[in-house]
Every structure is written in structure tokens, then in C-alpha cells.
Amino acid sequence: MIGEGILKGLAETARNFFGSYVNKDRLTTVQFPEERLPQIEATRDFPFLVYDGTDWQQGLRCVSCQICEKECPPKCIYIEKSKDKKPDATGKPQSYPTTFNIDISVCMSCQICVEVCPFDAIKMDVAFELSTDDRFGGLLLNREQLAKSNEYYNKIHPTEAAAVDAAFAEERAKAEAKARQAAEAKAAAAAQTLTPGAGETTRVQ
Amino acid sequence: MSVLTEAPVDLTPSQSDDRTDSQLLEVSMGPQHPSTHGVFRMDVALDGERVVKLKPVFGYLHRNHEKIAETESYLGCMPYTDRLDYICSITNNWAYALAVEKLAGIQVPERAEYLRVITGELTRLQNHAGLVGFLMQDMGASGTPLMYAFREREKILDLFEALTGARMMCNYMRFGGCRVDAPAGWLQQAQKVIDAFPRFLDEFERLLVSNEILMARTQGVGVVSREQAVNAGISGPMARASGVNYDLRKVDKYGIYDRFSFRVPLGENGDVYDRYMLRVLEMRESVEILKQAMRDVPSGPIMDPNTKTRGFRPKAGEAYGRIEGPKGELGFYLISDGSSNPYRFRVRPPSLINLTLLEDMCLGQNVADIVIILGSVDIVLGEVDR
């Protein structure tokens, strides 16, 4: 019979319409600004720089090795390296970026900067409400705008951040153990120099 | 196809036409908004309602992908491949990763192969769901079927977001594996989506498959014969709808596709209806593959430990990696000169090659049919123009 297929289809539409009152699966719309879907943990949009502690200038993990600048496919990162050095998270003296700009109008959120960073200094953000009326200055983020605390990183990507923190703690413990060993060796050497003969040989060696 | 050198459409009526007072009408269809079928234009010459000439004009979305790739590292090309066919980024990644793996002789671990099949088939599901929805939209069933299709597609995109961090620009595959392992609970979540998917297919079939208007609009429209399909080199669902039994998952058995049992649906008439039905049937087969893959997925590493992320330099040589993408045979041809960027990077885009038959399909049809014929080809202009 002509029209049977159309009626069958309409029955399906009706089922969906009335079903949306009882079945939540059929009503998928979310009234956005008032209602929000829960954040999916792996979500990424634009990169930010992680800092430890409370002062972003002191705690910035970036050592301006410029690997991300080289690897970035659309070349949206611009870094200037410092002339002097300051101690990093494990106490080693490292350079720091005097300029670190990311043009997020060019960035394509590919996460390659995060993958290649050996210092876990650059991570992906989840903030997506970034509209601005200044299309040049407003989308060119500098060091201060990019720096976000480790607590923030822990909040947006808990699993990933916990793994990074554990790795850092291990590294720090290793560095401390090494420092302690070095100190002990120094003390031992100092003790040896007190006895004149032994001190001589140490110096020769 | 050289747009600039080709003569403009001749508007003088043909001699065989006995009506001497008639004149052909040239209509420029498109370019439309990229979210429909893309910024694509057709110069159509019409005799009344009938199409007598059709000239596709594309290139509006040209982004110089192949040349940019020659200045990027091998890893840096990966996110650009997402943007070729922006509906199915994961299969694009896969084809490129396969080409580089062939070039450098990299082995992929078991678990990564399974994750590739799972994400790849999910991509096929969401591409075909989106396509049948859009095809109905083109036919004038505005809204309803498209929204039903997008409701399902959304669930798959949520899975992609939980796994890769992005809904569409996944950037998921790496040479020798995948970028991240499935997070805790992801496989269970995916299983739920896959188990629920046949329900959507049943619903969609009840909604439209026996609809008389749909049949009247699509049956016998835009016919591609078997010979034409083979001669034009078209691939994927387009070729299979014309009865060409050519599915790279069966022919090449790339990855681990030889482990799954699935059927390749074939069309008979090669018209728009066959192409539409073929996608629906293919989705059912993809669900079968997914069920088998989800059952067998092993644990283990997801990356080949010998492959470097940074400073990757394959030895000099050339390789062609191809996969059965949702739109057809997607291939990447790479030449390496031993440096860190490809010497030549060439994409074989299924959309572009399937589009070459557009004029043959449209000649003699009505104007309104052009839209659904174009819709049934399943093009994404990001891939056509590159």
C-alpha cells in the first residue's frame, strides 16, 4: 500500500517524541550556559605552562630548551632564552624563558609540544570560552597568561598530573640521595685530609 | 581538472534540439557553507529541468597540505592529516602511520592494532551515520533523520574525546602504535555504545528504508555501472554499490583484518538508493567487527619501543600505505631521502576520485537530483582540495 512506509516512519518519530519525556537517552540536548556536561578528563584545547609553588616566575618548569618551538607543526610558539640561570624543581641551575608566546589563533591543539617536552612543563588546557574582541593581542598569550599552577593541572587532568608528580618526586628523591652521597663523600674526604699522608694521595689522585 | 583553461559553458542550444527558441540556462550551484558538503561549486547547464552539462569547481578549501608536509617532520605531518577528511581523522592517521611504518619497517604491537581497528571502525560508523543523515537532509527530510544520526554520532565522538582528547581532530596514531592507551573504563563504555548501535540502525531502517518518497527520489537516480566504476578508479562504498567487490580490508588485509569475519555488502544497480543502503549495511558489518575486536583485545604495550618520537629519520626509499577508509581507498605515498622530513608526500584522496564521475551521474537528471547525487558520493572538501 502506498504510504505505508511513510506511516511507519512517522510512528518512529512519534515514539522518539513521546519517548523523550520518559527516556533520558532520547533527550540529549543540554541547555548550554546554564547546564554543562561533565568535563571529560582527556580533553585538550590549548597549551599552558605549569609552575610549581605559588610564584609563577620562580616555579616555571620550562627551561627554554626550545624543543616545542622546533617541533610545533604550525610554528605558533616563540621563545626567548634567558642569559642567566636559576635552580629548577630538582635544584639544578637551568635557563628560563624571558619570552614565551603562543599564538592560539594559529595553534591547532595537536598536543605535539606536550609529547616532546622532556620537562613536563607544557600541558594542555581545557578552558574553551576564550572569545575576545581583539583578534591579534587577545589571542597572543604571553608567559604570564600561559603560566598556571600545578594545582590547576592536577584539577583538570588528575590521572595524568598524579603520574607526572610521582615521576618528579622520584627524580627529586634521587637527586637528594645523590647530593647526600656527594656530601658524605666530601665529608669523608675532609676527614681523610686531616691525616696528612692520606690527604696527599687524595690530592695526587 | 584545469578550471582556468577550460572554455566556459557553451550556452547555444544543440542543433538536434528542434525547439529553436530555447536556450540553455547556466546555473552556478554553490559554494555552500563548509558544514554542509563543503565549499564546492558546480557550473550546471540546464535545458529546462534537465542537466546537459556539469562542471565541478573546487579548490576553495585548498590548504597546501602536501607541500607543507615536505617542510614538516614526519611526526609534524600527523596532525595535518586529521584535517584532510575532517569527519574521520582517525582513519587518516592510520593510513599515514601505515605508510611511514612501511617506509621504516616498524612493527606495531598487538594491543595497538586492536585499538586501531576499534577506533577505525567507530570512525566508519560515525561517518556513515552522518552521511545517511545528511543525505536525507539533502532530500528534503529536514532535521529529523539527521538529528537521529547525529545523536548516535555524538556518542562515538564522546568516546573519541575520552580516548584522544579531541572529538574530531584526534591525532591518535603514531608510527609503531597509538599515542595513548585506553583510560580505565573506556573499553566498557565503548562496548555499551557498540551494543546499543544496532538499535539505532533498526530505528533508522524503520524510519526510512520503506519510505515511498525516498524510493521514488533515489531509485534509478545517478546510476554508475560496474564498468564505469572500474574505469574511473572509484573505490569504497561508491564502487561496491555498483557491484565491484573491492574492499581493502579483504584484499590487502592490512593490520589484523584477516582475523575478523565479516561480509562485504554489494549493490546491484549502482544508484543513489544502493549507495544509501550499502552504508546502512556496512554499519552493521562494522558493528560485527567491533564486537569481535572488543572480545579479543589483549593487554600489553601500545607503542613499538624502538621508534623515536623526536628526530625520526627513516632510511631513503619510498612507500605507499593504503587503507579502506569510510569513503574509499585512502593512500599516502611517501618518498624519503633519509632526512627528518618527507621528500615527497602525496595523498590519494578517495573523495576526489569518487567525485570524477559526478558529471556522468548527473547528465540527463533533474536539477533537484544533483544535490542528492552529490550527497551520495560522500565527499569532504578538506580531502578533495587538500
Image (cartoon, coloured by chain):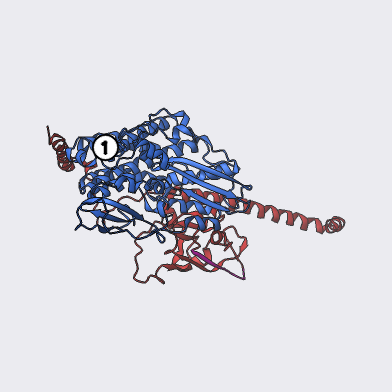
Chain colours: A red, B blue
Q: Tell which residue pokes out farthest to the right in this image.
A: A197
- Identify which residue, B307 or A164, lies in the foreground: B307
Percent of width and height locating residue B228: 38, 40
Percent of width and height locating residue B140: 20, 48
Circle count: 1
Q: Chain of mark 1?
A: B
Q: Residue at 31% x, 32% y: name it.
A: B268
Residue B243 appears left or right of A180:
left
> Dot 1 lies on which element?
helix
Percent of width and height locating residue B245: 40, 32
Res. B30 in view? yes
- Identify which residue, B138 or B298, lies in the foreground: B138
Which amino acid type corresponds to the residue marked 1 in the rendered image? Answer: Phe
Percent of width and height locating residue B222: 29, 43
Whether residue A45 is in magenta: the answer is no
Residue that badge 1 annotates: B200
Image: magenta residue range: A76-84
Q: Residue at 30% x, 40% y: name it.
A: B223
Q: Is residue B186 above or below residue B338?
A: above
- Identify which residue, B330 or B307, lies in the foreground: B330
Q: Residue at 50% x, 48% y: name it.
A: A163
Q: Residue at 62% x, 70% y: name it.
A: A84
- Identify which residue, A44 or B85, lies in the foreground: B85
Quadrant where the image shows the C terminus of chain B: bottom left
Quadrant where the image shows the N terminus of chain B: bottom left
Q: Is residue B293 above or below residue B95?
A: above
